[in-house]
Structures are given as C-alpha cells and as structure tokens.
Image: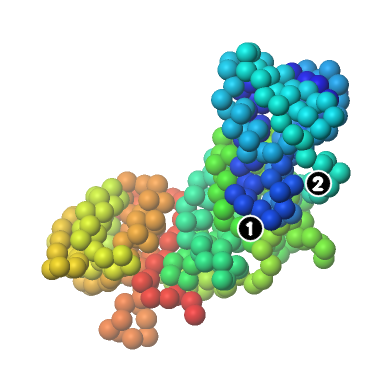
C-alpha cells in the first residue's frame, strides 16, 4: 500500500478515528486504526465492539491496500509532523510514515483478526447539527457516571414524527431538551427510543456540531440494537444500552405558580463564591424572598458565607437546600440572560419538592427553548 495525503487532513482523520477508542483494552488489536487505500482515497476506521468511527478523506493513492496500525501512536505522530505532505507506505509487516525530513517506521497489526465495522442501515431522520450539539451538552451532564446502574449512564433519545427529545438522569436530577426532527419520507408511528451512552453522545455532539445536518439511523433488530450518526463523510456508530429507562417525565409538574426569576450569571457567580467554605457534597441554603435570594453556607472550622442577589418572586417565600455543583450544571445549560427557578410541592407541606430550572428571555417572559432541569438534593428516584 502506498499513498500521499495532506498533513492536516490526515491528522484530523486519524484523531477522529481514535477519539472514541477506550484508554485501556484487554484486546490490543482493538486499539488499532484500520486504514484502507482505495482508488478514490482513504477510509480510516476504528471499532471496539461497542463504538465505531469511520471517515473518508481524499489522498493520492499509488497502490491500494489495507493496514492496521496502533491508533494513538499514529495520532500522536500525525499531530506533530512538519508542514509537508504525508507519505505512507507498507512493506511486509512494516509501515513507513514520512513527512518532510521526519520519518517513522511502525509495526502493523494483523488485519485479518480485526472485527468487521458495523454497516449503517437506512436513515431514520435528520437533525440540525448545532441544535443537536447544544441539546446534548445541556442534557448529558445529568447522566449518571456510576456504572453500577448502566441504564442511567445513557441519554434516552425519543423520536416522534417531527421532534427529538433527549432525556438524562442520575436520580438526583433530570434534564430534558426537545429539538426539531426531520423524518423525511420515513413515517414515524408512535415513539422510537434509543438509549445511547452519554460519553459517546457527547463526542458526537462536539465532533458534528458544525456539520450543518446530522443523519441519524436507529436499528432495533433482535441481534443488534445500534445507532449511527453521519455527517461530512464521518460516521459514528454505538451499541444501545439495554434496559428500561426510568419514567422520569412524570416527575415534571404541569404548571408551577411559585417561582423566582433572576439574572443567570449573577446566580452562578454568587453560588461559586458562597460554596467556597463548604465541605464536599454539602448543600447550599437558598432563601427566596420578595427582596431577593440569599445564599448561605456553613463549612468546617466555623467558616461561613452569605450573599444576596436581586430576584423577582412570584408566590410565597421559599427555602431550599441544593448541592451547588448540581445547580451550577443546570444554570450553565440555561442559554439565556435570566433563569426561572420554580418550586414544586410535595404531599408534605413542610418539605419542598424539587426545583425546576428553565430559561427566561427577560424578567417577565419565559424562554422560548424547551430545556428543563429538575433538581433535588434527595433522590428523585429510588
């Protein structure tokens, strides 16, 4: 195999292919990147039986062929090559990479032992890339990082005829965002669901965020449940998480009369300041009153902090205790100057329910997006 490629194009393609590879694997061959030189260019692929990445780039191919090489090593080399065309050739089990005056010799891995890359089925629908990337960033932060309960380490995608909902929870909070979905000529009957690992979805959002439109394919067959995202000659596939996602939508109230509106940046900065005296995992006390919201913290060694910021309160004065980092995650996902914090009720009048965080266009007008973030220091789900 022999080819020549643009250094930046080749480096970006290798970087994309290795991005989703596991840091450690029990099968060394799965740490490789498969490079296939065809008459029309190069196809670079990686696959670890759960997630695959594949991209096509233009190259001057002198001799077609296929080779498997250590992915992270090749990515490191490609990112540091001088500004000159990359020349790539193989001879027996050796791979030679040269660029300008730099030259590397690498050992190839056995191609015949590498698993087949999953094939993408027909397109299920299209989503606007920037909106999808923003929605993933808003929602994925609420997914659990505890592998003991795999079903909540993912983001649930729920597809109807013209909308896509993203839902995530770690049992302490729930995040939901809805965006437009174009099913094209595919008629969607009922709701199609896909539970995607949050880490994979976050990488897809970052990689495809400026691609214009992302094509999504969801395959639910008996032997394989798979989702694929394709844009700009790049494709990422992922096995879906098996199991039933908890019915968290029922936790959201239909209407809430008691709420406060304040400047988002002011609340974020005040929370970051006051939490400095707190011990890890401790909660902040928030008192929402007619003259503003007061944040109070009591830490170790009698350290204390408090701050009051402006707020407009509708309803009765309310006191809640919230974990500051969970609150900051929700506030950072509100892409508006103002934020509304609504206070839900429980059967016990002395115990406040979870707070609902939504965007607010102005002090008087609710936000136009569909982002919702429900937070409670105690478990929402058991």
Q: Classify residue 94 by image quadrant.
A: top right
Residue linked to disc 2: 114
Residue 76 figure quarter: top right
Q: Nearer the viewer, residue 8 or 98?
A: 98
Q: Are marks 2 and 1 in contact (CB under 8 Å)?
A: no
172 and 312: which is toward the camera: 172
Q: How many marks?
A: 2
Viewer can see residue 256? no
Image quadrant containing the N terminus = top right
Observer-nearest residue: 348 or 228? 228
Give percent across and percent down for residue 3: 78, 20
Q: Earlier in the sequence, mark 2 or mark 1?
A: 2
- Judged left or right of residue 375, residue 63 is right
- Cα distance between the residues tagged 2 and 1: 24 Å
Provide residue 60's location: percent of width, then percent of height.
78, 17
- Looking at the image, residue 382 sits to the left or right of residue 213; the answer is left
Residue at 70% x, 23% y is 97
């Amino acid at each position: 195999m022999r080819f020549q490629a643009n250094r930046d194009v080749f480096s970006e393609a290798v970087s994309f292919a290795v991005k989703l590879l596991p840091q450690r694997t029990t099968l060394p061959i799965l740490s490789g990147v498969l490079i296939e030189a065809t008459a029309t260019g190069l196809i670079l692929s990686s696959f670890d039986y759960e997630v695959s990445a594949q991209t096509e780039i233009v190259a001057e191919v002198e001799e077609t062929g296929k080779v498997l090489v250590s992915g992270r090593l090749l990515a490191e080399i490609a990112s540091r090559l001088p500004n000159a065309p990359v020349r790539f050739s193989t001879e027996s089990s050796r791979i030679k990479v040269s660029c300008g005056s730099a030259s590397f010799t690498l050992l190839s891995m056995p191609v015949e032992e590498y698993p087949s890359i999953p094939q993408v089925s027909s397109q299920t629908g299209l989503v606007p890339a920037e909106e999808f990337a923003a929605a993933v960033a808003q929602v994925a932060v609420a997914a659990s990082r505890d592998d003991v309960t795999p079903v909540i380490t993912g983001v649930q995608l729920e597809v109807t005829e013209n909308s896509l909902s993203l839902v995530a929870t770690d049992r302490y909070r729930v995040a939901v965002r809805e965006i437009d979905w174009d099913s094209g000529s595919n008629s969607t009957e009922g709701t199609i669901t896909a539970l995607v690992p949050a880490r994979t979805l976050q990488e897809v959002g970052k990689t495809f965020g400026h691609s214009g439109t992302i094509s999504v394919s969801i395959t639910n067959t008996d032997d394989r449940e798979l989702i694929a995202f394709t844009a700009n000659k790049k494709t990422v596939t992922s096995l879906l998480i098996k199991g039933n996602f908890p019915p968290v939508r029922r936790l959201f109230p239909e209407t809430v009369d008691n709420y406060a509106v304040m400047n988002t940046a002011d609340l974020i900065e005040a929370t970051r300041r006051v939490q400095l005296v707190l011990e890890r995992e401790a909660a902040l006390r928030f008192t929402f009153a007619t003259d503003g919201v007061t944040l109070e913290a009591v830490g170790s060694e009698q350290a204390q902090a408090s701050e009051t910021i402006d707020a407009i309160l509708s309803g009765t004065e309310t006191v809640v205790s919230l974990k500051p980092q969970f609150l900051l995650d929700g506030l950072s996902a509100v892409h508006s100057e103002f934020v509304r914090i609504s206070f839900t009720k429980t059967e016990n009048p002395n115990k406040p329910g979870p707070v609902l965080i939504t965007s607010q266009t102005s002090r008087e007008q609710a936000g136009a997006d569909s982002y919702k973030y429900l937070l409670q220091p105690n478990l929402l789900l058991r």
